[in-house]
Image (tube, coloured by chain):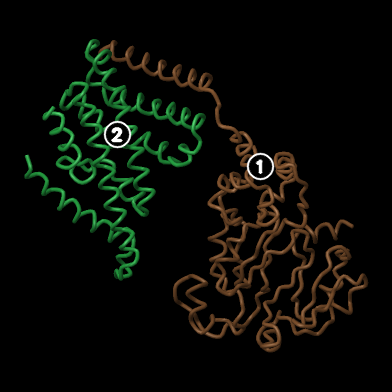
Chain colours: A brown, B green
Amino acid sequence: MNIGSIIVLTLIGIGCGIIIYIAYVKIPHKVKGLDKIEEISGALPGMNCGACGFAGCFAYAQELAKNPDIITQSPCSVAMQNPDAVKCLEKSLCISLDAAAMCKKAVIHCGGNSEVIYDYSGAKSCKAAAQLWGGYKKCPYACLGFGDCAKACPQGGIVIDKEKGIAVIDRTQCTGCGLCAAECPQNLIELMPADTKVAFQCNYEPLKNIPGRGKCESGCIHCRKCFNACEYEAIIWNKLKAVPEFDVEKCTLCGKCIEACPQNTLAFATPVAAKCEAAV
Amino acid sequence: MSDLIAIFLGMALINNFILVQFLGLCPFFGVSKKLGNAVSMGLAVTFVMVIASIVTWIITRYVLIPFDVLYMSTVIFILVIASLVQIIEMFIMRTNYALYSAFGIYLALITTNCAVLGVTLINNIQKSYSFPESMAAALGGGIGFTLVLAIMSGIRERLELADTPKSMKGLPVAFMVGMLLALAFSGFGGII
């Protein structure tokens, strides 16, 4: 073995390292605004989900640096959930943000329990199953439970409840990117404000069809029992869609609407919310 | 002079990096979906090839040959090209941000591109070119690379609209097109 080769390689390696270091220190920063873009992109999640409508987080940061108003038009709901990131964005963009209103998380509008009407043995994909007579469940709006949404979730926050055959979203992990909502062929997933307390687990088709009655054991039958059970006027009855809507401010997480529901359509939006209630 | 032109044309067409020597195949399929991207990738490769040729020629001449360690050329060239690209990227980022965003991710990708390593190895080890000759070879190689990338992306843009069988859509049909292109380029072999 030639000792010269070792020495040459070592010296060239060290030389390259030193030259890169000198270049790093000595090359002047002539570009203005790059620091700002880097500061903004540092506050963004960097997962490049594309939910804001731009080609990745860095492109979003570049646009924000040019025009800070973009953040109100197409907010990054992932960053909005992180108080540090919100503070950082407020500081670098010189605007104040209402993070709570911009922050959204996914809710799935199906509680399972719809009867299976035929054996489906095709491709294990919701999209494929939905093509065949609107799915293998009695309710044509039901969650088919093959987990197209779970595959799309970059956080791994969606699991399939094998017993009920539906997807369950872990809202503590959800970042509100909305990739799952785009994936669902039944349009069951909706992005709702992050502080939503009670989830309505049924995908009604307003006035056209009533899936609750006779099609599913946990579908809404529009009985208004939840509306009447609430002592805090936190439930508003939407007459057009014939479904309850929830006022987050007034809701105290008492759980009476959930108890009153004869169909198990209502549930706490996050397990955390249920835990808080138990602690109180 | 005619020597240099012969080397230039030989590298650009007859011994084309992608279609004849099969170097740099990843950008050939990876970055050939849009004409704009393909051309900027090609230009970035040409630029890095020329600069890498200059530096590696100096290193071969003044380090490798005097110390008699030519057999170490591959590892040393990788080291030198990688740090060179890093420095160039840093320089462009800090002086001309528009150019930096035009190069985008391609400049960093070129760090480990085999076509760049290939041109330096051919210049310095295989053929032992002089300085002007290695410049002509690097320029020719880069321009041939850009040309093939541009042709391929033009064809692939049309292919998107063509009625290809479903199982052949995308990459499979691109492989077929690559084969036909390589066949066409082998025709240049008859020039010299």
Q: Quadrant of the C terminus of chain A?
A: bottom right
Task: Please report the residue visible at 59 percent of the width from the left and 69 percent of the height from the top.
Answer: A162
Task: Please report the residue visible at 40 percent of the width from the left and 30 percent of the height from the top.
Answer: B85
Task: Please report the residue visible at 61 percent of the width from the left and 77 percent of the height from the top.
Answer: A142
- Badge 2 local density, few (<14 within 10 Å), some, or many (20+)? many
B9 shown above or below A264: above
Residue A207 position by quadrant: bottom right
Residue A173 position by quadrant: bottom right
- Left or right: residue B180 versus residue A261 is left
Provide the secondary structure element on which disc 1 rests.
Answer: helix
Residue extending farthest to the right is A231
- Left or right: residue A183 versus residue B141 is right
A145 shown above or below A55: below
Residue A188 position by quadrant: bottom right
Residue picked out by circle 1: A43
User: Is B18 or A121 nearer to us in this picture?
Assistant: B18
Which chain letter matches label 2? B
A6 shown above or below A117: above
On the image, the x and y values in percent for residue B67 come to: 25, 11
- The amino acid type of the residue labelled 2 equals Val
Provide the secondary structure element on which disc 2 rests.
Answer: helix
Residue picked out by circle 2: B116
Q: Are marks 1 and 2 on the same chain?
A: no
- Left or right: residue A265 versus residue B130 is right
- Give the Cα separation between the discs numbered 1 and 2: 36 Å
- The amino acid type of the residue labelled 1 equals Ala
On the image, the x and y values in percent for residue A187 come to: 60, 72
